[in-house]
Amino acid sequence: MTAEMMFSRSSSEYKYGFSTDVETDTLPKGLNEEIVRAISAKKEEPPYLLEFRLKAYRKWLEMAPPHWANVNYPEINYQDICYYSAPKKKPTLDSLSDVDPEVLRTFERLGIPVDEQKRLTNVAVDMVFDSVSIGTTFKKKLEDAGVVLCSISEAIKRFPELIEKYLGSVVPIGDNFFAALNSAVFTDGSFVYVPKGVHCPMEVSTYFRINDKETGQFERTLIIAEEGSFVSYLEGCTAPAYDNNQLHAAVVELVALDNAQIKYATVQNWYSGHPETGQGGIFNFVTKRGRCAGVNSKISWTQVEVGAAITWKYPSVILQGDNSVGEFYSVALTNGRMQADTGTKMIHLGKNTRSTIVSKGISADFSHNSYRGLVKVVPRASGARNYTQCDSMLVGDKCSANTFPYIEVGNATSQVEHEASTSKLNEEQLFYFMSRGISQEDAVNMIVNGFCKEVIRELPLEFAAEAQKLLTLKLENSVG
Amino acid sequence: MIEIKDLCAAIDGKAILKGFNLKVNAGEIHAIMGPNGAGKSTLAKVLAGHPSYEVTSGSVLFKGKNLLELAPEERAHLGLFMSFQYPVEIPGVSNVQFLRTAYNANCKARGQQEVSVEDFEKLLAKKMALVEVKTEFKDRNLNEGFSGGEKKRNEILQMAVLEPSLAILDETDSGLDIDAMRIVAAGVNHLMNPDMGLLLITHYQRLLDYIKPDFVHVMLDGKIVQSGGPEMALQLEEKGYDWLNEPSKEGT
């Protein structure tokens, strides 16, 4: 697998839209207590986890899906979704690089050498195919450093104390409708544990692939950074192009103890539906939250969101430890008929806590792109500081961009700053570049990446260039 | 250098250029003057290949090639340069990055060796001295937060870097105070050479005190109605453009 394959490189057509024929072990569609028990049984889980699931399921039954986001979609029939699907025969890792020739042609067009055997250098990858983790690379090297990277299913068996202590500790089972659903039916995901004082020697990463047409993906990720440790994590996502919508309702929990630091980066390129009719695509309803539990801890979210029919996602940080730091760097690009309502929550509980929010929204075609963010400072969080910058770029005149900042300050010694801007990528800008001899493709690349510069530079080096190219490709047909 | 014949062009179905003729040879400086709405800026944009304008008839030969068939970037590769009247602001793209990309794109298209970051810095330092712009200019975002005068000087810096064979300066004097105009004019005069053609589009005569044209043309309603030597600019300054309207009205 190469770095390029982590992300779809698509222009108007989603080149990762192919599906793979595999024999699967699938539970019948629909959700009830029996299904929840069956999932737990299939995964041979300990009783505490079944309890966790059942409690979540009962909570979920009493909850209603949120309607406050600035997105529109038909009601989801939760009884028409399959909640468990696993390949019977585990595909080997190499089969993931067995990519459609169309995709290879896209690479060639980009001038990127396609090497099926080439693994990501210095990046350990856990791969999740529909509901299960199919393998992890560089396991040995990580283990030598004392770092655990494995599927959450494996962690449930190997590290029951850690799971029982931390699972649901950042995102409680009844946090919101989708988190409750996930807590009841999650099938797999990644688990990362970095022991005290360890600086994780390489990037750790999960690649999520939805393959099955009627399976929802409910992955669960838990990252624990013990005192004084450091880890940088990256996830990538793609899915086949189907004409029905698929639900992806993940929960990600991060815990950083004293002086620990977690960097979490996402490059999300789910299938976003037909660009003209809007048919199909992934509903990306995700709850991501980190807890800076210890003093001087730091959690940093970086996301490049360029796919999914609908994105509902607010990676947040609870700044509990004194002097802890929360960061959110986001690029959300919508085109076609995509809708995104994304942002963050920074909850300042500890003294002298600091947070930075940099959000770049790019909307093209007929898409809707909203930033929604909350900065909350509780009365005892003296000396808290926040800086928020929200910039929107419009491409064309049929799209829209909105900013919904919520600020709640309960302490007079805190400082909260908010800056916002809206600009347009237009014919005049492109003409200016072209009249100097620069091609349209390079012009779009420079303008868009200039706009997103502050976010892109937060990505791990291996992926920054890929993310830049992805942004350019996505906009190729929306301009000029 | 360039030969424009019976050029007609429209925007949104509205005819702006109505049979424009002009020939510029290497080493010549031509000034095009005329009132607002005469089509001066349209001429500049049509020659540079702005996509909003539709050429309805006529021909333009530039260095023996049919200019109208070329994409804007191909026109630049061939040596055409237009200084914008209102340069756009580009956040997040530094001036030096833009200039280097443009310089190398032209090198590549002409089959020349692209230059390294270090070599380009050296080249740029010379050009910046030539048009008297401060070093910090290069690290600022392209035109972002530039004053009107700074934008115009930045255009001339681009011209200095790209060394075009035909430069079209569209109202480069507007928004410049007298000192800035002197500097810009000195830069243009320095860049002008016997192998190059220069087309100055201006509203007022004052720029022509600093850049001496060989020919002055008056443009009215989409075409040239009068041509003459540099002395004609002074005449226009005195009498305005109204007197030129008379014969054209009689003509129709």
Image: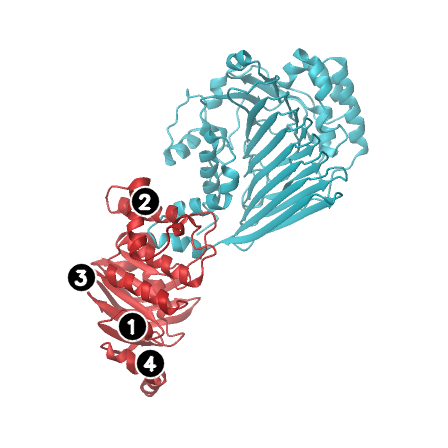
Chain colours: A cyan, B red
Q: Name the residue under label 4.
A: B237
Q: Nearer the viewer's eye, disc 3 or disc 2?
A: 2
Q: Is mark 1 on a helix, strand or loop?
A: helix
Measure the alpha-carbon separation of dots 2 and 4: 43 Å
Q: Is mark 2 on a helix, strand or loop?
A: helix
Choose the circle earlier in sequence order: 4 or 1.
1
Measure the alpha-carbon separation of dots 1 and 3: 19 Å
Chain letter of disc 2? Answer: B
Quarter residue A325 falls in: top right
- Figure quadrant of the C terminus of chain B: bottom left
Q: Which mark is residue B121?
A: 2
Q: What element carries label 3?
A: loop
Choose the circle earlier in sequence order: 3 or 4.
3
Residue A49 is at least partly visible in this image = yes
The answer to whether residue A474 is left or right of residue B83 is right
Q: Mark 3 points at which residue?
A: B194
Q: Nearer the viewer, residue A166 or A207?
A: A166
The answer to whether residue B217 is left or right of residue A228 is left
Q: Nearer the viewer's eye, disc 1 or disc 3?
A: 1
- Figure quadrant of the N terminus of chain B: bottom left
Q: Which residue is drawn at 24% across and 71% down?
A: B213
Chain letter of disc 4? Answer: B
Choose the circle earlier in sequence order: 3 or 2.
2
Q: What residue type is labelled 1?
A: Leu
Measure the alpha-carbon separation of dots 3 and 2: 27 Å
Choose the circle earlier in sequence order: 1 or 3.
3
Whether the residues at callouts 3 and 4 have beta carbons within 8 Å, the answer is no
Q: Mark 1 points at which residue?
A: B208
Judge the density around disc 2: few (<14), some (14-19), many (≥20) Cα neighbours within 10 Å.
Answer: some
